[in-house]
């Protein structure tokens, strides 16, 4: 037998083998969903996530093929991945909003010592509230609290001199507003994290279902 004949024979066997694999995959893909559990009572095995188009959705879902079921799972996976992306955006937005709120919460007053006494300052001296600055330690604690680590406490800022009361009260209003906003954002942040965790669990479940169908030869 010539080498050409042998090669053709081997190629023919390979083609037949591929054809059998494809035929088996097609046969598996065309099985009904109800065949996944042949011993179950009639009408109890359905594919509830498959869209229906008639007035008898239960019958449609019972008669759906495994290929239709796989397509539905893939649609579910794409939807969940989109929802996860949206939840991640919500989380990022909460982080940005939290940073802004914490910036207000972490403000400290800057008092400047003044005197015009002569010859001794002690005869005429006072403190003037000349500005404010960010307390980096408090800022870090606030950002951690927004992300769920620790909590926020009501800050107490000393008032130096009644002459500074109006500006001091304005600063305290900024601090209290920052605290309230940070606490609100912290709740949003936690909700977004919980949503992501829930979606991740659903994605893992759908991916397992897709893998199970792939293992049966349904692609």
Image (spheres, rainbow, N blue to C red):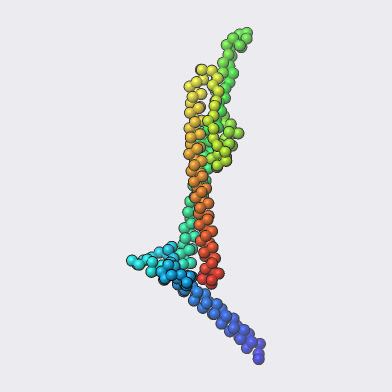
- The residue lying toward the viewer, choosing from 112 and 70, is 70
Q: Quadrant of the N terminus?
A: bottom right
Is the residue 204 above or below the residue 19 in the image? above
- The residue lying toward the viewer, choosing from 174 and 195, is 195
x and y, in percent, of residue 22 in the image: 53, 77
Is the residue 155 above or below the residue 195 in the image? above
- The residue lying toward the viewer, choosing from 10 and 205, is 205
- The residue lying toward the viewer, choosing from 115 and 33, is 33
x and y, in percent, of residue 82 in the image: 48, 55
Is the residue 124 above or below the residue 74 in the image? above
Residue, x 55% and y 42% (percent of image)?
147
Q: Quadrant of residue 18?
A: bottom right
Q: Is residue 106 left or right of residue 49?
A: right
Number of numbered discs present? 0
Q: Is residue 68 visible?
A: no
x and y, in percent, of residue 120 in the image: 62, 9
Q: Quadrant of residue 211?
A: bottom right
x and y, in percent, of residue 95 in the image: 53, 42
Residue, x 41% and y 69% (percent of image)?
43
Kindly give the residue lying farthest to the bottom in the view shown: 1
Residue, x 44% and y 65% (percent of image)?
47
Is the residue 65 above or below the residue 173 in the image? below
Kindly give the residue lying farthest to the left in the view shown: 55
Q: Is residue 77 visible?
A: yes
């Amino acid at each position: 037998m010539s080498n050409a004949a042998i090669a053709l024979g081997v190629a023919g066997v390979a083609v037949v083998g591929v054809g059998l694999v494809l035929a088996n995959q097609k046969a598996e893909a065309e099985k009904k969903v109800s065949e996944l559990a042949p011993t179950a009572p009639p009408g109890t095995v359905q594919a509830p996530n498959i869209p229906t188009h008639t007035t008898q959705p239960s019958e449609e879902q019972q008669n759906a093929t495994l290929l239709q079921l796989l397509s539905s799972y893939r649609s579910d996976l794409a939807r969940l991945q989109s929802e996860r992306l949206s939840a991640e955006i919500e989380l990022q937005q909460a982080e940005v909003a939290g940073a802004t709120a914490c910036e207000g919460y972490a403000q400290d007053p800057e008092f400047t010592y003044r005197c015009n006494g002569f010859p001794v300052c002690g005869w005429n001296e006072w403190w003037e509230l000349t500005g404010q600055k960010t307390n980096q330690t408090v800022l870090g604690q606030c950002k951690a609290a927004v992300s769920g680590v620790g909590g926020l406490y009501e800050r107490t800022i000393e008032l130096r001199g009644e002459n500074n009361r109006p500006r001091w009260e304005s600063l305290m209003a900024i601090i209290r507003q920052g605290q309230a906003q940070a606490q609100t954002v912290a709740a949003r942040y936690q909700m977004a994290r919980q949503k992501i965790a829930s979606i991740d669990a659903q994605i893992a479940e759908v991916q397992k279902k897709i893998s199970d169908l792939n293992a049966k030869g349904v692609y």
